[in-house]
Image (tube, rainbow, N blue to C red):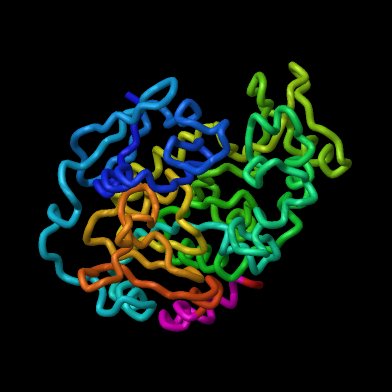
Amino acid sequence: MECLCVSTYMRASLARSQTTKWAPVAQTAFSKAPPRFGVSNYKVHSGNCLHSPYHGRTLTVRGMHQSEDLLLPDSDLASQSGARRAVLNSFDLKGVAERILEGKASRIVTMVGAGISVSSGIPDFRSPSTGLYDNLQKYSLPYPEAIFDLDYFREKPDAFNMLAKELYPGKFAPTPTHLFMRLLHHKGLLLRCFTQNIDSLETLAGLPEHKIVAAHGNFDTAHCIRCHALADKEVVRATLEADGKPTCTACGGLVKPNIVFFGERLPDRFFTCAQEDMRECDLLMVMGTSLQVQPFAGLVGQVPLDVPRLLINREMVGVRDSTCNAGFGTGYFEFGVENTRDAAYLGNCDDGVQQLVDMLDWRSDFDNMFK
């Protein structure tokens, strides 16, 4: 069965036909995507379910050409959990720092998005006027997301190739937030870094490859979109730098870096690590992401109910509102009166992690990361 575990909040979401972005796996019938994206394009990799602590009956979503089974919990998370004690002394950076200093957070999972790379000079995707999607006019796209549309790439690869040339690793340096994650690893506290970013700055910052899950791929490898043969990434890079069009030496098909496009499945490693790591996680840090893209955003709700979650972001995201418009996936941040575990810092990611560093008395170690 092809399935993905989602929270019971999905039922309300479906009833309201809320807007949802299922990108890089594809778009579902519930999104305001271009007409080419329908349920017929919606794919969840067979056999890779994200298991929530509460999963039960299935819901079949029927589309134009196929149906998908989605695992749903039998009852709401709130009713499952009952009355719970607060696991943080305060729902801010201080409360999180205290938990780390108390030795209660030794298997930290980070979820990061484009916001952590902005200070390196790479634009995020959705910020008004400065985001990538608002600055693609020079590519003459029919709609912004076409830059990562596999069908469009087959027809007109030049737009993505020009963007790839601009974004190739080596042109940008890791940010303080990247180095903070390296410091977590250095102290033996980082279980895994799940990143939406394709810039490979986590690797450049010094995180070992096995600690990183590049949910949407990156430039580390490349392949042919026709025969799927691996390509020499250095040859691909040199071709793009020369404004050429990388092609497969085996079949002549188009070659692109292993960045996940709409219509492509996420790497198997994403599902495998998510299933294992979220069970083991004892502190979740969500930094610099809009939490608008599934299934990545759904990881927020995959940690156990007694695990604290910290949001470091310019604005509140992933918060369930009265219209259930916070996002389509498992688990919402709860910053209201029922909050027992969610902390937030609203501001630049670099500023947030540096304040956390000082609260942890890690300043000397952190500054050494820059040497």
Q: Position of residue 49 (x, y in %)?
A: 34, 35
Residue at 41% over, 67% down:
311
| Quarter of the view holding residue 308 | bottom left
Q: Is residue 64 left or right of residue 79?
A: right
Magenta-colored stretch includes residue 368: yes
**Res. 338 visible in picture:** yes
Magenta-colored stretch includes residue 128: no
Q: Position of residue 97 (x, y in %)?
A: 36, 76
Q: Is residue 246 above or below residue 86?
A: above
The quarter of the picture where the N terminus appears is top left
Q: Is residue 234 above or below residue 298?
A: above
**Closer-to-camera residue (101/140):** 140
Q: Which residues are magenta?
A: 355-369
| Quarter of the view holding residue 252 | top right
**Res. 188 visible in picture:** no
**Closer-to-camera residue (30/251):** 30
Q: What number of labels is visible? A: 0
Residue at 30% over, 61% down:
322
Q: Is residue 252 left or right of residue 293?
A: right
Name the main secondary structure of what is drawn in magenta. Answer: helix
